[in-house]
Image (cartoon, rainbow, N blue to C red):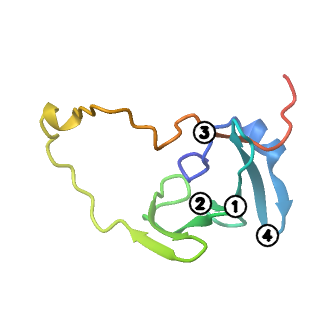
Amino acid sequence: MVRTGFPLDLPQWILALGGAVVPPEVRWTLVSEPSGGDTITVMLREGSAFPSLAGEGGGAEVTSASPGDIYEAWPTSWRLSGPEQGLEMSVRSISRPQPPPESVWGLHVPVSVDTVCMDARWRPGWEIPDR
């Protein structure tokens, strides 16, 4: 499920517990941590190889995939939507150039950067019994 776009790496038994069947799809609700104020819904439609995501701020869905069965295909284009705009992205080519020199990977920032909260994570929005 992670390869296909599910935002958490969960054991199959936990995924099975949290999936709410709403024909023709299965839905999982994820809650933000540590605040728990935001939620996203992961939806997997019957027959789809990839799930879609929806939340208060918009959503994302895979619109095409590479050749192969559901176990080998990878997303190649996506539709992202927001409250007032949308965006479509496609992989047009894949190249593997030589890795850049080591100096490209270093970045010195003389001030603290606190614009992004790295503590925010998603957790399952359903009860998981102790095993």
Local packing at callout 2 (Cα closer than 10 Å; few below 14, some 14-19, many 20+) is: many
Who comes first in sequence, dot 4 or dot 3? 4
C-alpha gap between disc 3 and disc 2: 24 Å
The residue pinned by badge 1 equals 44
Q: Secondary structure at mark 2?
A: loop
- The disc at residue 120 is 3
Q: Residues within 10 Å of mark 1 (few under 14, many from 20)?
A: many
Cα separation between marks 4 and 1: 9 Å
Tag in front: 1 or 3: 3
Marks 4 and 1 close (CB-CB < 8 Å): no
| Disc on the earlier residue, 2 or 1 | 1
- Indicate which disc, 4 or 1, sits on the residue closer to the N terminus: 4
Identify which amino acid the numbered label 2 is placed on.
Phe
Give the residue type at disc 3.
Ala
- CA separation in Å, label 4 and label 3: 31 Å
The amino acid pointed to by label 1 is: Leu
Q: Which residue is mark 2?
A: 50
Q: CA distance from mark 1 to mark 3?
A: 24 Å
Q: Residue at x 30, y 68 (%)?
A: 92
Q: Quadrant of residue 67?
A: bottom left
Residue drawn 84% across and 64% down? Answer: 22
Q: Is residue 129 above or below residue 64?
A: above
- Name the residue located 52 percent from the left edge and 77 percent from the top edge: 85
The furthest residue to the front: 111
Q: Are marks 2 and 1 in contact (CB under 8 Å)?
A: yes
Instruction: Please name the residue shown 56% across and 53% down the image.
Output: 5
Q: Position of residue 57 (x, y in %)?
A: 63, 64
Left/right of residue 117 with respect to residue 37 in the rendered view: left
